[in-house]
Image (spheres, grey):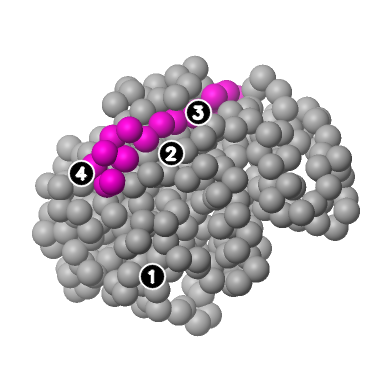
Amino acid sequence: MRAYVTGGTGFIGSNIVKVFAERHGATVHCPVHSFVPDNPQGYTTEPLDLLDADAVLSSVAQFDPDVIVHSMILNDLDGIYARRELAWRSYVDATLTMAEAANRAGAKLIVVSTDWVFDGTQAGADEHTPPNPVNYYGVLKALSEQAALLQAHRAAVARVSAVNGVHWARDEMPRGQDPGYGYFVTTVLDAVSQGQPFGVWEGDDINMAATPSLASECAETMWLIAANDDADGIFHCCGAEPAGRMELARLACEVFGHDPSLLRSVPPDSEMMSSMAGARIPYDTTIRTPRTTEILDYEPLGTRELLDRFKQELESGDLVPPTTGG
C-alpha cells in the first residue's frame, strides 16, 4: 500500500506513519511544513504548503497513493480564534483539496477528527450521533468531516479521543496539561515519576470525561480502515472505556508504578482559561464504537491495557505487536 500522510511529524501522525510503514510495510510519504525531521525513518518527506492547492494536487499525483490519511491540524485553540480565516483554510479548504487529490488519484481519503465535534452533553455518542460542536475547533472539524464525506469518492472519518502515547517524531510533547485530554498521561507521568506532586485540573468548564486512547492503537484502526475497501463513513478510533481526569491519572500511576498520593485536585489554570477567547469546552465527550467494531471486526482495548501498551512502548522504544493479529 502507498500512503500519503499529512501531519506525519505530529503526535498522532507520527504514530500513523510508524504503524503503516514499520508494522505493515506500507510505502509512506509525508509533506512537511513547520517541522522537518533530521533523519526520517521508514518514510519520505518533502516541503509543502498544504494551503497551496495546486502544489498539493501535484505532490499527490506524483506519489500516486492508494490512501491519503489527512491528520494535519492547526493545533492552537487560541490561534484558531485569533486567525479565523487562516483556520478555515487550514481545516476546511485543505480537506477539500485533499478530497480532490484523492479523487484524481483514485485513492481513499481518511480524515482524522475528534470527539470535540460533540457538545459535552452527548455522553456515549456513537458513530451515528449527530455532532453539535460548541467551539470553533469543533466546528472546523465537523465541517472537515462533511467536506471529506461529500466530496471524496471514497472517504472515511477517523475520530480520536483523549489520545496519549509516544511521539515518534519528537523527543518532547508540544504542550502540558490543558482543558482537553491530549498528552494528559504524559504530563502526569513527567511529574510523579520524579516524586513531584501533580495538580489534576477539575472543574465545570473543561473536558472532564472522555474515552482514553493510545495513539498507536488509533493508527492501527486507521490501517484497518485503509485496508478494507468497504470501510467508509464515520469510525471511532478510541479505547473501550470512558474515564474522568482523576480516574485516568490514578490508573496511570498504578500501571507505571508511581505513587498516586502525589495527585491533587486543583482548579484549571486561570491564566490559560482566560486566554482562550471565550471558547467553550465540552464537558463529557465520551464516545462508543459499535459501527467501528462491526465493520472492522476490531474490539477496542480497555484503559488499563492501553496504558500497559503505552508503558511497553516507552520502555522498548518501539511499537508492541498489534492486538488485531494484522
Q: Earlier in the sequence, mark 2 or mark 3?
A: 2
Q: Nearer the viewer, residue 95 or 29?
A: 29
Disc on the earlier residue, 1 or 4 = 1
**Real-space Cα distance between discs 3 and 4?**
23 Å
| Numbered circle sitting on residue 285 | 3
Residue at the image point whose x is 33% and y is 33% from the top: 290
Task: Give the residues in magenta.
Answer: 277-297
Q: Is residue 89 visible?
A: no
Circle 1 residue: 23
- Of circles 3 and 1, the one toward us is 1
In the structure shown, which secondary structural element does the residue marked by tag 3 occupy?
Answer: loop
Q: Are marks 1 and 4 in contact (CB under 8 Å)?
A: no
Q: Is residue 135 left or right of residue 198?
A: left
Residues at circles 2 and 3 in contact by the CB criterion of under 8 Å: no
How many numbered badges does the structure rendering display?
4
Would you place residue 236 above or below residue 30 in this image?
above
Instruction: Using the rendered view, name the quadrant where residue 92 is placed.
Output: top left
Give the spatial CA distance, label 3 vs label 1.
Answer: 30 Å
- In space, the residues marked 1 and 4 are separated at their CA atoms by 23 Å
State the image coordinates of residue 153 (x, y, percent, origin top left).
12, 47
The residue depicted at 36 percent of the width and 56 percent of the height is 324
Above or below, 73 against 116 in this view is below
Whether residue 110 is visible to the viewer of this picture, yes or no, is yes
The residue nearer to you, when weighing 82 against 12, is 12
Q: Which label's residue is closer to the chain start, 3 or 1?
A: 1
Q: Quadrant of the C terminus?
A: bottom left
What amino acid type is highlighted by mark number 1? Arg
